[in-house]
Image (tube, grey):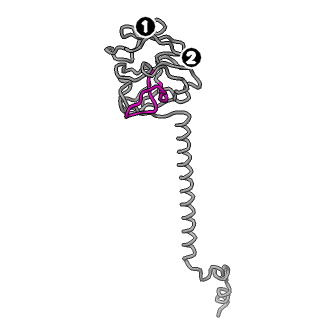
C-alpha cells in the first residue's frame, strides 16, 4: 500500500461522519412527507371552514340588521314593481332618517289585514299619508290636507276609490299600492303602526332588465 492509498483509506466517508443515516429506509422520508401533506390539507380545510362560517355570520348579521331582499308576490305595486321582482330593503333607514311621503316600504302584516290562501307576512306599499295628515279621495283624486297631490307612479287611467276622509294618528302611516284598482292596503286595514315597519325599499335587484333605484 502506498502513502497515497493509506491516506485515502483513513479519510472518513459520509457514513463514518453520520452513522445514524446508515441503513435508513426511504419509507421514513415518504411517511414524513405524507404527514406534512396531511397537516397542510387539514390547515387549509380549517381556514376555509373559518372563512365560510365567517361569511355566513356576516350574511346573517347583514340580513338581520342592515339589508334584506324581498320577493314581490302580487301585482299591487304595478307598474312600479312587477310580480317576481326582488327588491333590497334598508332596515336601518328610519333609525337615522325620517319617513317621507312617497317612500316604498316593507312592513309586517297589520292585525286587521284580511287573510287569504296565499298569505304573506310582509307587505310592500307606498307611503301616502304621514302622522297628522288628513286624506280623502275626491273624484278619484287623492287630497292630503285639502290639497290634491301628484302621483306619477300610478297609471293615468287608475283612480283612487274607497278613501273617505281619514286622519292618520300619531305613530301611524297610511299606505297604498300603486295599482289602486288591485291593492289591499290602508283603505282596507287602516293606517299602519310605524313599529311594524321593516324598512325602506330602495333598489330593484332582479330581474336584470329592471335593476334600478326606487
Q: Which residues are magenta?
A: 105-126
Percent across and percent down for residue 49 are 54, 53
Helix, strand, or loop for circle 2?
Answer: loop
**Residue at left offset 54%, top offset 76%:** 27
Indicate yes or no whether the magenta region holds residue 67. Answer: no
Q: Which residue is mark 1?
A: 148
Q: Quadrant of the C terminus?
A: top left
Expressed as whole percent of the image width and height from the top left, the position of residue 35 reads: 57, 68
User: For residue 154, what is the image quadrant?
Assistant: top left
The image quarter containing residue 116 is top left
> Would residue 89 appear left or right of 10 to someone viewing this image?
left
Rounded to the nearest angstrom, the CA distance separating label 1 from label 2 is 22 Å
Dot 2 crowding, Cα within 10 Å, few <14, some 14–19, many 20+: few
In the picture, the disc for residue 170 is 2
Disc 1 or 2, which lies upstream in sequence? 1
Decide whether residue 114 is among the magenta residues.
yes
**Is 49 in front, or is 22?**
49
Q: Nearer the viewer, residue 4 or 102?
A: 102
In this rendering, is residue 49 above or below 119? below
Amino acid at each position: 500500500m502506498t502513502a497515497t492509498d493509506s491516506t485515502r483509506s483513513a479519510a472518513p466517508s459520509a457514513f463514518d461522519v453520520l452513522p445514524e443515516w446508515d441503513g435508513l429506509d426511504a419509507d421514513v422520508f415518504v411517511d414524513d412527507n405524507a404527514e406534512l401533506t396531511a397537516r397542510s390539507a387539514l390547515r387549509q380545510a380549517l381556514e376555509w371552514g373559518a372563512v365560510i362560517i365567517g361569511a355566513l355570520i356576516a350574511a346573517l348579521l347583514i340580513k338581520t340588521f342592515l339589508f334584506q331582499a324581498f320577493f314581490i308576490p302580487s301585482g299591487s305595486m304595478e307598474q312600479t314593481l312587477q310580480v317576481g321582482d326582488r327588491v333590497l330593503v334598508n332596515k336601518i333607514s328610519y333609525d337615522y332618517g325620517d319617513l317621507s311621503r312617497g317612500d316604498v316600504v316593507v312592513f309586517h302584516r297589520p292585525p286587521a289585514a284580511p287573510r287569504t290562501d296565499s298569505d304573506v307576512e310582509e307587505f310592500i306599499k307606498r307611503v301616502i299619508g304621514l302622522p297628522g295628515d288628513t286624506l280623502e279621495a275626491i273624484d278619484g283624486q287623492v287630497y292630503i290636507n285639502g290639497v290634491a297631490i301628484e302621483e306619477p307612479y300610478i297609471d293615468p287611467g287608475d283612480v283612487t276609490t274607497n278613501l273617505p276622509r281619514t286622519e292618520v294618528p300619531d305613530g301611524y302611516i297610511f299606505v297604498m299600492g300603486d295599482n289602486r284598482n288591485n291593492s289591499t292596503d290602508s283603505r282596507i286595514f287602516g293606517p299602519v303602526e310605524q313599529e311594524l315597519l321593516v324598512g325602506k325599499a330602495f333598489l330593484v335587484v332582479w330581474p336584470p332588465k329592471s335593476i334600478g333605484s326606487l
